[in-house]
Structure formats: C-alpha cells, structure tokens
C-alpha cells in the first residue's frame, strides 16, 4: 500500500521549469457541476479576471501528470483561453487549485499550492496532510 501511494506522488511531481509567460485572452463565468446549495452559491460567487488567472499560473507549478492526489477536487471550474509561448490554449481552473491547458490533443497539468493562491481558489490545498 505504501509503495502505491509513493509511486502516485512521484508520478505527479512538478516539472523543473514552471514559469510560463501567459497572456489570458478570455475568462468565462464559473461552471458548477454539483448539487445546488451553499457549494453552488460559492461557485457562482467565485470570480477571476484576466490578471488573476495570469497570477494563478505564475504561482502554479507544472506537473507531468494530474496532481489529483495532492489537491481537493471541487465541482466548480473557471474556463477560458490563454496564449503562452506563442501558442493558444484552452484552460480550466478547478476550485481546488488544479488546472489544465489543452490544445490539439496536448494537455498540460498545473497545481497552485502557494499561500498566495488562497484568494484565487475556493479551497487551498494542504497537500492532503493529516
């Protein structure tokens, strides 16, 4: 069991170069995919503008695979489009601090665990520490 957990953490390790030059060109309203109630209200109230999305990615680390096991997964996300290194990407930021970029079958994974990410997400990670 311990070996499986350690292997999962290693496969989601951050890449060394994780400082993307990002220009956000579109941010859409949050999408809630859960049941209505307090969670849905919190999602609807979550707003990020272009500069906040750019800040989120400046603070984030890029991962080779989804860092799913290190972040909370929430049924709320903000999507949009950005340009990095001359390439256009669709992005999706989860309320728990993970994000993906996609373009033509390619996917890049991100996670924002820095203290400065707290005002940019609905639930900041504690890296699943007990």
Image (cartoon, rainbow, N blue to C red):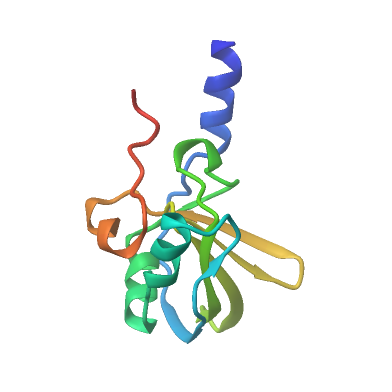
In the image, farthest residue toward the right: 105
Could you tell me residue 116's position as x and y percent? 23, 58
Q: Tell me where residue 101 sits by quadrant.
A: bottom right
Front-lying residue, 45 or 71: 45
Vertical comparison of 81 with 65: above or below? below
Residue at 51%, 30% in the rendered image: 9
Identified at 36% across, 43% down, the residue is 125
In the rendered image, is residue 29 in sight?
yes
On the question of residue 17 being in view, the answer is no
The extreme left residue here reads 115
Locate residue 89 relative to residue 114 in the image: left or right: right
Given residues 52 and 9, the one toward you in this image is 52
The image position of residue 39, as x and y in percent, is 44, 56
Give the farthest residue toward the bottom. 25
Find residue 22 and report its horizontal and vertical position in percent. Answer: 43, 77
| 76 on left or right of 46 | right
Q: Looking at this view, is 99 or 96 the one in front?
A: 96
Residue furthest top as drawn: 1
Q: Quadrant of the C terminus?
A: top left
Q: Give residue 96's position: percent from left, percent from top.
A: 43, 51
Residue at 55 percent of width and 84 percent of height: 86
Residue 98 falls left or right of residue 88: left
- Looking at the rendering, in which quadrant would you find the N terminus? top right
Front-most of residues 98 and 33 = 33
The total of numbered circles placed on residues is 0
Quadrant location of residue 118?
A: bottom left
């Amino acid at each position: 069991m311990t070996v499986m957990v350690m292997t999962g953490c290693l496969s989601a390790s951050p890449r060394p170069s994780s400082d993307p030059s990002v220009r956000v060109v579109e941010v859409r309203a949050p999408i809630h995919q859960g049941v209505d109630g307090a969670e849905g209200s919190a999602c609807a109230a979550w707003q990020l503008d272009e500069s906040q999305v750019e800040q989120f990615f400046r603070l984030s680390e890029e991962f080779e695979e989804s860092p799913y096991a290190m972040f909370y997964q929430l049924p709320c996300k903000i999507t949009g489009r950005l340009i990095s290194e001359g390439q256009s990407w669709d992005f999706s930021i989860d309320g728990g601090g993970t994000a993906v970029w996609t373009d033509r079958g390619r996917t890049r994974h991100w996670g924002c665990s820095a203290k400065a990410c707290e005002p940019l997400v609905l639930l900041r990670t504690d890296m699943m520490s007990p």
